[in-house]
Amino acid sequence: MRLFIGAFLNSKEFITRYSGFQAVANDYIHGKWVEVENLHFTLLFLGNIEEDKFLELKEKISPMLKTYSDYLKVQGLMTFKEFNPNPQIVSHIINPSKNLFKLHYEIQSITDELLIPTDKKKFRPHLTLCRTKAPEPEKLHELINKYESFTLGDFQEYQINFIESQLTPKGPIYKII
């Protein structure tokens, strides 16, 4: 099964702001926007994992799979791969307590101990908003600069889960397991 550990972010206010932002951003870029029910952040992507390794991992990290009362702010825009012809537009997740970093590194340590290979890229909490389709670089930069301080939402809590990701031609299907 293809898995990651993360949390979905949604609230009525957040969804309203996200939908409004999409309408404005469509004047600058075109692409596939993440469906509101799929908006999430990833603490650690596990990829395809065998059932026995999953059960071992689940046992070790089950105390971390819970709801956290911890402030998160979804703010600003950026891309990770500016020179990619179709960059993803993402928003920063700001976590003053740094609890997300602590959780990420604790889980990473456990996956290393269990010899579960994971991506070792630097952890940068973010929320993917749109996968662009051949954007004009000037318009993309204008959008990012114009909305660098725009807040999409504030959250006082989030629930960390194992999430299964099934890739389909119409997009991913996510399921909490």
Image (cartoon, grey):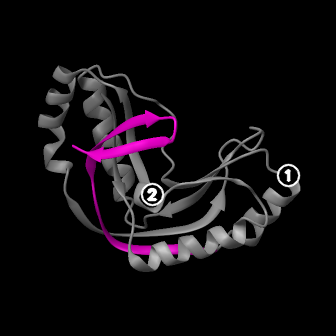
- Residue 103, percent across and down? 31, 49
Left or right of 29? Residue 130 is: left
Q: Residue at x 25, y 24 (%)?
A: 113
Q: Which residues are magenta?
A: 150-177
* Nearer the observer, 33 or 106: 33
Q: Quadrant of residue 3?
A: top left
Q: CA distance from mark 2 to mark 1?
A: 25 Å
Is residue 13 one of those drawn in magenta?
no
Count neighbours of disc 2 (C-alpha within 10 A) and say few if under 14, some if 14 to 19, many if 20 or more: some
Count neighbours of disc 1 (C-alpha within 10 A) and say few if under 14, some if 14 to 19, many if 20 or more: some
Q: Quadrant of residue 20?
A: bottom right
Amino acid type assigned to the residue bearing label 1 in the image:
Glu
| Mark positioned earlier in the residue sequence (2 or 1) | 2
- Residue 155, percent across and down? 38, 73
Looking at the image, the residue that sits furthest to the right is: 138
- Residue 97, percent across and down? 37, 65
In the picture, which quadrant includes the N terminus?
top left
* Nearer the observer, 148 or 40: 40
Q: Is residue 9 above or below residue 124?
A: below
Is residue 161 one of those drawn in magenta?
yes
- Residue 157, percent across and down? 30, 69
Q: Residue at x 79, y 44 (%)?
A: 134
Amino acid type assigned to the residue bearing label 2 in the image:
Leu
Residue designated by label 2: 39
Q: Is residue 122 above or below residue 151?
A: above
Residue designated by label 1: 136
Left or right of 144? Residue 115 is: left
Label 1 secondary element = loop
Magenta span: predominant SS is strand
Label 2 secondary element = loop
Q: Is residue 127 above or below residue 46?
A: below
Q: Residue at x 85, y 51 (%)?
A: 137
